[in-house]
Every structure is written in structure tokens, then in C-alpha cells.
Image: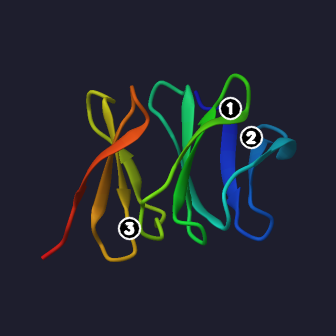
Amino acid sequence: MVKTLFAANSGNNTISVVEISTGRITDTIPVGQQPYGATLSSEGKRVYSGNLADSSVSVIDVATRKVFATLHDVNNPRQAIVFTRDNRYVYVLNKDLSLSKIDRQTQRIVTTIGCR
């Protein structure tokens, strides 16, 4: 059962860690500019934050509550961040409706799929 919520705070460029049972903020993690959405991986080890204003994705280690990777070259990422069934890749929706495909092992963008 999920006990923690990770909430994007675009006004102060952070992700809040919220204890669901009490509603209390237990930590605040600095990320890129204007985080627009945050998604927890299915195994609960990583949070991916799409940062609208600086066109980046911050990857947060849940155990340490620190950003350990920042990916650039995304196009104003939106709230839609999803994982493949095997958890090998993350897809991030961009402003132009393209998708950036991120390899979770290397934390690198492997391709961008454009919309037609």
C-alpha cells in the first residue's frame, strides 16, 4: 500500500514528500524549474519529475530523497510520464506531443518519437 505521495510544486521548483496518513510534508526536494508532474516508478525506487520551464526531467532516488540524474533535451515536458510494463523505459510527453523515451538503466534519452 502506498504510504507516501510525491507532489510537484511549480511555484518553488520542488517536489514535496507527503505522508499520506497524516497529510504532513516530511521532506522537500529541489528539482528543475517549474515541475509540472511527478511519477513514482512501479517498484517505488525512483520519482521522475518533468520540469516545464527548463525542459528537463529530474530523476529522484526515493531512498535518499535526492536528485541523482537530470535529463535535458526534452521539449517542455508535461504531466504524462509513464513506464513500460517491463520498467525498462520511461516515456515523457512533450509540449509538441512528441514522446521522449528514457532508458532507466542509463538515465538517458534514447529517442524522441514525433507526432504526425
Viewer-side residue, 86 vs 70? 70
Q: Residue at x 38, y 67 (%)?
A: 94
Which numbered disc flags the more N-terminal residue, 2 or 3?
Answer: 2
Viewer-side residue, 60 vs 5? 60
In this rendering, position of residue 113 left or right of residue 76:
left
Q: Residue at x 73, y 32 (%)?
A: 65
Q: Looking at the picture, how far across and down is residue 73, in whole percent? A: 43, 59
Which circle marks residue 94 in the picture? 3
Determine the CA span between mark 2 and mark 3: 29 Å
Determine contact: label 2, label 3, CB under 8 Å. no
Q: In terms of secondary structure, where does tag 1 sit?
A: loop
Q: In terms of secondary structure, where does tag 3 sit?
A: loop
Which numbered disc flags the more N-terminal residue, 2 or 1?
Answer: 1
Above or below, comparing residue 77 to residue 69 in the picture: below
Where on the picture, by quarter, is residue 114? bottom left
Which numbered disc flags the more N-terminal residue, 3 or 1?
Answer: 1
In this figure, which residue is indicated by the disc labeled 1? Answer: 3
Above or below, comparing residue 75 to residue 38 in the picture: below
State the quadrant of the N terminus: top right
Q: Looking at the picture, how far across and down is residue 35, in whole percent? A: 63, 62
Determine the CA span between mark 2 and mark 1: 6 Å
Q: Residue at x 66, y 68 (%)?
A: 34
Which circle marks residue 20 in the picture? 2
Determine the CA span between mark 3 and mark 1: 29 Å
Determine contact: label 2, label 1, CB under 8 Å. yes
Q: Amino acid at mark 3?
A: Asn
